Image: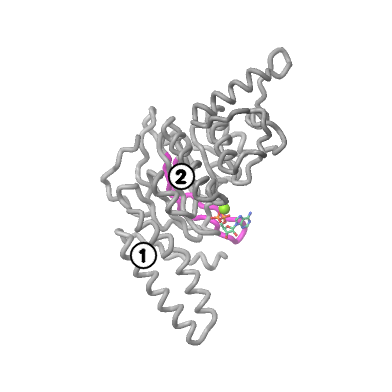
Amino acid sequence: MSTPQETPAGKHHAPPAGNGSSGVPLVRLVNAGKRYGAVIALHDINMEVGAGEVTCVLGDNGAGKSTLIKIIGGLHQPSTGTYEVEGTPVHFSSPREALERGIATVYQDLAVVALMPVWRNFFLGNEVRKRGRMAIPAMKKMCKDELLAMGIDLRDVDQPIGTLSGGERQCVAISRAVHFGAKVLILDEPTAALGVKQSGVVLKYIVQARERGLGVIFITHNPHHAYPVGDRFLLLNRGASIGNYEKNQVTRDELTGLMAGGTELEQLSHELESAGGAVADLGRSMEADVEELGISHQPTSTTTTTTESDAR
Ligand SMILES: Nc1ncnc2c1ncn2[C@@H]1O[C@H](COP(=O)(O)OP(=O)(O)O)[C@@H](O)[C@H]1O
Ligand SMILES: [Mg+2]
């Protein structure tokens, strides 16, 4: 379980992750960055993911969230900085390699075959065979048991997965990753397309995955989804970290303020300024508000004066 740290870590430094059995974080990024040609999608990101913890990555569109999880999930390599898994530097050249180290990604647009039964989707690519034949009853039972262990009681694992709700499908994907031995579970905006009730269901399974000792990386732009389940929070804005907090270092309101301050207000003020005239004055006064917000919510002064707007 998470052990709150008292150390007033600088806002760009990853607070030390809770110890797994081995005493080192499952995942650690140190000053990681990513360029796509001239575009700096991410820079100087520090992050730690501990076993039995939920690390939330928050940020608006274009903040670099997907780029970050593509690095962790093995789809991309960082252009700068280091990436360690359980204390050793890694250089994954594919998601398969990351998976072999127990790092599983559940993408928002789940790769499921809608007309196939739930159990077939569960074992897709990992079918259990006995003497060359698919062990169908065994797979159905394993699937049902695994879903039950996560608290999902499906009457019939033979039903097409397309008949499940979006939230339930996310949950099948989560329990599948758990079943196949994931240590780190990356969820890219699993609640973005869901209503309040379905989001609640997914949040419940995030907590269950944590209870089972996984390190969960939960990507979202919604602080109201992140705060109840998160142990630590990394806030991104235009590829840079604007905060790295443990739960005891930040309140839900501060988190919400940081999100609004770092993104919406700033973008709005830029929009208004580019309009010129009296509207531009309004934009500049909003920008001042943004700065004020930033100061009141950020205790340390290790501000990086970056102009990612150049890179956009
Ligand atoms: N393959 C790519 N080539 C060039 N630029 C990219 C690529 N992927 C992402 N970007 C840029 O990197 C920035 C971060 O994008 P992304 O990681 O998708 O953000 P988020 O997931 O937070 O919306 C954006 O400015 C985006 O346009
Ligand atoms: Mg994204």
The main secondary structure of the magenta stretch is strand
Question: Within the image, what quadrant is residue 175 found in?
Answer: top right
SS at circle 2: strand
Can you give x and y, in whole percent of width and height, for residue 37 in the image? 62, 58
Q: Residue furthest bottom?
A: 277
Image side of residue 166 versus residue 215, left or right:
right
Residue at image position (46%, 44%) is 29
Q: Compared to 267, does 138 lie above or below?
A: above
Give, as a single range, the part of the protein colored magenta.
28-49
Label 2 beta carbon less than 8 Å to ligand 1: no
Residue 67 seen anywhere in this rendered image of the structure: no
User: Badge 2: how crowded within 10 Å, few (<14), some, or many (20+)?
Assistant: many
Residue indicated by mark 2: 29
Can you give x and y, in whole percent of width and height, for residue 294 in the image? 36, 65
Q: Compared to 216, does 226 lie above or below?
A: below
What amino acid is found at the position of numbered circle 2 in the picture? Leu
Question: Residue 9 shows which numbered tag?
Answer: none
Image side of residue 175 versus residue 9, left or right:
right
Question: Residue 294 shows which numbered tag?
Answer: 1
What amino acid is found at the position of numbered circle 1 in the picture? Gly
User: Quick one: quadrant of the N terminus?
Assistant: top left
Residue at image position (55%, 32%) is 177
